[in-house]
Amino acid sequence: MNYVFALTFFILGAIWGSFLNVLILRHNTGKSPTGRSGCMSCRSTLRFYDLVPILSFLALRGRCRSCGSRISIQYPLIEFVTGAVFALAFYKFGISLKLVLIFIILSLLIVLAVYDFKHFILPDFYMFSLILFSVIYSAVSGVSIVNIILHGFLTAVPFFLIWFFSKGKWMGFGDVKLALAIGALLGLPNSLVAVALASVLGAFFGVAYVLYHTMCITGFAFSSKKVSIKSEIPFGPFLIVATVLVWFFNLSEIYLRFIGL
Ligand SMILES: [Zn+2]
């Protein structure tokens, strides 16, 4: 029976994910998030059977039905990820009112991660919503408001110091706010484990990124884009991936046992 529920949450999540795609795409463009979707190249309106999450993209092999231009892999990817984390959240937390809160927080995390990845900005509207719902989630889970605020600020302090002393060069202020939200959501020491994991993920990705681009520049690999090693990598997406991993898989317990605490 659980499989039926998990599959249902995956499908609902994937449908919800296509709405998150629209939110990400239309943020700051002045377009209403509720208008009908159309192809970015030829403007032809999509039919309902072109809007089935994941499957439409596969059926059309990633191209527009009318003009044949490529559809971004972002669409099926976000749909799949949203479906997967919704199904996982159901497995981990079961059906309760709290699950709705968790779905809201996961949605905000997905929008923020993708937007930061594409534009190097964590939009305030989604960030403040994340802080608000993280506080509500922890309060509903029985954490006192004093502790929620304290853990939020303690997690954000190192980020604030890096932001302050590098004058925003090494760390954006968005990351400071994100760290505050993660502290409120996970609490100490879990939030710091998430930060540590994010640093490891970011370092691995950074090394791979520099290696790949060095190969492109020296002609060992091909890239259609003009590349330079100076391109910055946002930290937000790594923080968010690490947060979900720590939250869902009790990674902090494993980590703390590993370092002998
Ligand atoms: Zn088209």
Image (spheres, rainbow, N blue to C red):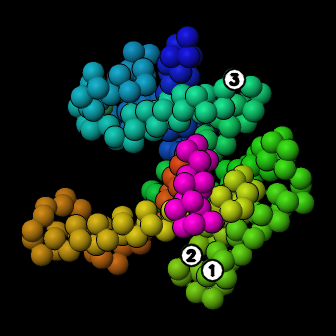
Q: Which stretch did the figure color magenta? A: 247-261
Most extreme residue toward the bottom is 165
Where is residue 185 shown, x and y percent of the image?
Answer: 72, 52
Res. 171 mark? 2
Q: Which of the 4 image quadrants contains residue 86?
A: top right
Q: Which of the 4 image quadrants contains residue 175?
A: bottom right
Res. 163 mark? 1
In 3D space, how far apart are the residues under numbered discs 3 and 1 (Cα atoms)?
Answer: 40 Å
- The residue pinned by badge 3 equals 95
For ligand 1, tell me if the residue under mark 1 lies within 8 Å: no
Secondary element under disc 2, as helix, strand or loop, is loop
Asked whether 248 falls inside the magenta stretch, the response is: yes
For ligand 1, tell me if the residue under mark 2 lies within 8 Å: no
Q: Residue at x 74, y 49 (%)?
A: 134
Asked whether 81 falls inside the magenta stretch, the response is: no
Q: Amino acid at mark 2?
A: Met
